[in-house]
Amino acid sequence: MSLSRVRIACKACRQSKARCEMREAPCTRCTRLGLSCSVQPGFRREGRRERMRQLEDRVQRLQGLLTDGSSSTETTAATPVIVVATSYTIGEVTLSSGRVQRLFSVFWQRYHPVLPFLDESRPAAEYHGESELLFWFIISVAARHSSDRSLLARLMPLVSERLWTTVAASAPSRGLTQTLVLSSCWPLPDFRLSNDKSVIHANLALTCLSHLGLHASQEDVAAECLRIACTIQSLSSLSMDQGIPPPASVSLEIHPHSRIPLALRQNLQIQQWSVRALRTLFGDDACAQLPAAAVFYPTMESLERDFDGLCNTLGRGQQLSLTTALRLAAAGLYLDCLYFSETTPGPQRKQGILRAYKTAGELITTAISHDAAYDELRYSSVATARLLLTAAIVIFRVVHSTYAVSVDVSKAVVLYHSACFAIHRCSLPDGEEDEEEEEEEGEEKKDKDLPYRMVEALKLLWRMGETDTSLLSREPSLTVQNRICAGIFFDTVVLWRQYSRLPAMTLDFLPDMSWDASDWTLFEEAFTNH
């Protein structure tokens, strides 16, 4: 005869389908896990559906309690809570909320109109809550011409480290993308000409935009402004600064219902034309060469007519903001620079290069005669200094060649000097220092202030060009042929490096450029006389 054993299990072990060693309550398992142990005759284990139903009921009860506790819950949930701090700190730098407000005000009034893609209606505290990186970069940009000259110097290493740490360790975000756009416009002055990262930042911003799914036109105004700003910065840096045809995947359209600021809309129109012109000549081939002369010259004539139509559509000179007027002139200049890359000599090539010379002169004239030039150049982006540099290079290459007989050399000298004046205006302020302090900080400033370095390079270039018979005895030509519109810039950089490596004794015997690049009054008088 078999004897059946009576199994006794507690409620907790039955629910978990666990072996229960019940001799007396509590059982071993409940003791180990700290559970309430009890025996309930007739207990039936709850299924998953029943437990889910109980959890849903509990959630609904809690939601009801929250709703009853505040009648404005929906409004509060929809509007983020802005915590206004009395001060803000990064590293060893602490700024009061009042000073932060003043710096943000400077940024909105002076810098942001250059590329208006951020929301000015949002308070500084909201930017800090959403992205501390973006917040501190805005502060750094506004501090460029602050009365406290030490502020930017103290912020630079801290903001730079946080930027690269965020790029390396964090997923793409809107705040990071916006910061990269700002950095491509006003990079921190902690680099030299050889390691300028603003171009890298512009293209990183476009990559982040794609990861965020914002690469196509958006109805949301904030997202659309960010997309357009990324597109303008990235494509202009690729084609104008690096000489690389723009990728075909970038969208250049504007959502028809978006209320985009006029400056952004106009600059995108200029970029649309530039991309269309380059694709007409080179297609989507990043390694493309100029088409044959029989195709090149008729195509250029057609594109020049299209550019004149763009100018008539947007307006010229005082009708546009300084930044937009310079970008428009630069679009025509970079197209005309392609004539330097054409290797077949002849009257068409000479006519094209002289057109580039004329366009460069018009760009420089715009930079120094525009009503807002004196104020706005001070707060302009690094792109302004770059395109002025290219215009000065075109003047230099034409004057120091056999084409010099076809231009007014005395006016060319004034234009070249004027470009240096305008570029110098884009540099950081010298401040009020004594001569000893200026001498100590001179070398550091030359290394890290890009516009200042540009002016020094242009002065050396002109001094050397005056004695370089190899330039003066031939037509302007380029050895760098793989950089499309930027070919003349890279070719002249090679020339400048050759000059800069000459012994110091050789440079001492060169004619000096007897003018001060920071004296705006002298510049105005010289330009007026011509």
Image: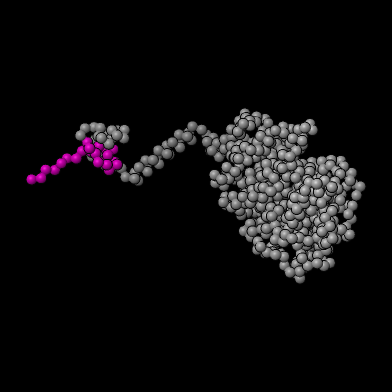
Tell me residue 335's x, y (percent). 76, 59
Examine the image and state in which quarter residue 98 appears.
Answer: top right
Closer to us: 327 or 449: 449
Query: Along the horizontal axis of the image, is 36 left or right of 520?
Result: left
Colour convention of the picture: one colour
Task: Tell me the residue at 84%/57% (across/down).
Answer: 469
Magenta stretch: helix, strand or loop mostly: loop
Span shown in magenta:
1-22
Residue pictured at 73% horizontal, 58% vertical:
487
Q: Is residue 272 visible?
A: no
- Is residue 69 visible in the rendered image? The answer is yes
Which residue is at 74% across, 60% downward? Answer: 479
Which residue is most to the right?
529
- Is residue 334 rendered magenta in the image? no
Q: Quadrant of the N terminus?
A: top left
Residue 64 placed where, x, y %? 45, 36
Q: Nearer the viewer, residue 487 or 147?
A: 487
Estimate the x, y position of residue 496 in percent, counting from the top left: 76, 52
* Residue lying at the far left of the rendered structure: 1
Above or below, 381 against 475 in this view is above
Residue 12 is covered by the magenta coloring: yes
Query: Quick one: 22 or 299, which is closer to the camera?
Result: 299
Instruction: Please identify the residue farthest to the bottom as the structure is shown.
Output: 294
Percent across and percent down for residue 373 are: 81, 44
